[in-house]
Amino acid sequence: MERLRFFLNDRPVEETGLAPTTTLLRYLRDRAHLTGTKEGCAEGDCGACSVAVLEQDAQGAASLRSVNACLLLLPMVQGKRVYTVEALKENGRWHVVQESLARGLGSQCGYCTPGVAMSMLEACHRRDLDEPWKLDAQMCGNLCRCTGYRPIREAAREVAGLCPPDRFARALAETRPESMDLAYTAGAQRYFTPGSLDALWDVLDAHPTARFVVGGTDLSLEVTKRYAEPPLLVSLEAVADLRVLAPREGGHRLGATARLTDVEDYARGACPPLERMLRYFGSRQIKNRATVGGNLCTASPIGDLAPVLLALGASVVLRSRGGERRLPLEDFFVGYRRTARAADEVLAYVDLPAQPEAARALAYKVSKRREADISSVSAGFRVVVDGQGRVSEARLAYGGMAATPARALKTEAALVGQPWTEATVEAALPRLAEDFQPLSDHRGSAWFRAQLAQNLLRGFFHETLETPRPRLAERHTGSVQVR
């Protein structure tokens, strides 16, 4: 399909000639003249541009999700339904979200309020807000500098899970999946969204230099901040095979294009260490778009998923037209921002093996802000203690300590075969200085990172003494919880 086709506030839209790097935010304000959606940071931090998109979740059910319009390239909404704040009022009546915000004095200057309202709209139609922290997580991606958060939180609590019989409920019940297939050209730029792996291989045969994209939460920053105009983008978003989340051989298979909100829901009962890291990964709007594969393929030294997946013994499956190959995750990262993926391959799956019953495993993230921030240091740990109380296996992985996420191999060796005691941990800690020589930057000095790496391992020992894989407490203040 060579035209961009989607629904905007239930109205069908067709567009041609627009650059594929046009963000949804700029389209709404400059072309559709829907100026209720505001621009604040243009990098997904403030939430002022939040809109709601109706699409299919990992199980194929329709869901309404708040996303940052500043990070969505227009072709990413191909075949979807987009709702802005203007859609809330229906038949002359204010939506319950708007009424709740106004009645609770949840708005002052009003600049952030449209984005707040759209995040509340997702909460209004969620049926899984069964724990109080989930409402905090729902709203943490929306800044409001003049109102304060108490009235906003109370308004959100008032509408959460109401699922009123509004236009959005009707759309959720009646909308059938539209094709996302797209072969779009505008000027010197091209954008493809193949609908199957076979179609993907055809695109790659014709365009071997293509750059992959799915959620766009990283790539779109190049557009909004560096004014980049990538000439050739191929989206993997419509390839259903790559979005799987399922048990596999006692472990788990995570599809490369699985959204992190879906992964978090899946991990809640299946993999507590992964769930813990995803709590701090980013805002709800970001996690509604960000993917497993995107986070790994950027090969950032501070990517949050890599340490916990390394600790859990993950492997990656790379696919091409010729077949597939499997690599341990530690072999996937070959240098700063570089991976072992060949030009004709895609990262298809991340496989987590079955975890030993005796395994103690956790993940940690330390950043200047608790919510929606980039890591200074992150870590994933798994230690297996045998029946005699000795360490039979140790996997200690860190982010933010080297050019790539990496395991602390010398520290691991100092633990294996030793009794799992505080004295053993303390004796092994100096080996971290042999494993890593971190750099100093604006997120932390080399000394801070080195000390923090030690403290995280200390915290892991104490936190897992009684519960091998504890969940975060309800009102937590950080990812390390030692009482």
Image: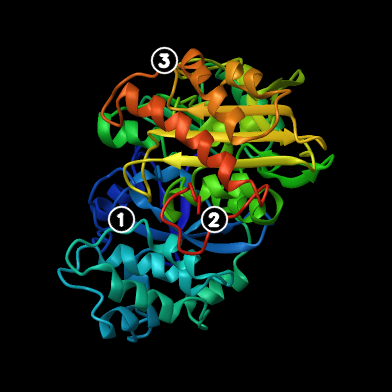
Instruction: Measure how far apart labels 2 and 1 are at the Cα level.
Output: 30 Å
Which of marks 1 and 2 precedes in the sequence?
1
- In this view, the residue in front, 477 or 167, is 477
Picture coordinates of residue 365 (x, y %)?
A: 46, 41
Q: Position of residue 20 (x, y in %)?
A: 39, 37
How many labels, in total? 3
- The N terminus sits in image quarter: top right
Other residues around mark 1 within 10 Å, as few (<14) / some (14–19) / many (≥20):
many
Dot 3 or dot 2: first in sequence order is: 3
Secondary structure at badge 1 equals: loop
**Does the image show residue 396?**
yes
Q: Badge 3 is on which residue?
A: 437
Q: CA distance from mark 3 to mark 2?
A: 30 Å
The residue type indicated by label 1 comes to Cys
- In the image, 89 versus 471, the foreground residue is 471
Secondary-structure class at tag 2: loop
- Asked if the residue at tag 2 contacts the one at tag 3, i.e. Cβ–Cβ closer than 8 Å, the answer is no
Q: Is residue 341 visible?
A: no
Q: Is residue 108 above or below residue 260?
A: below
- Where 28 sits versus 135, above or below? above
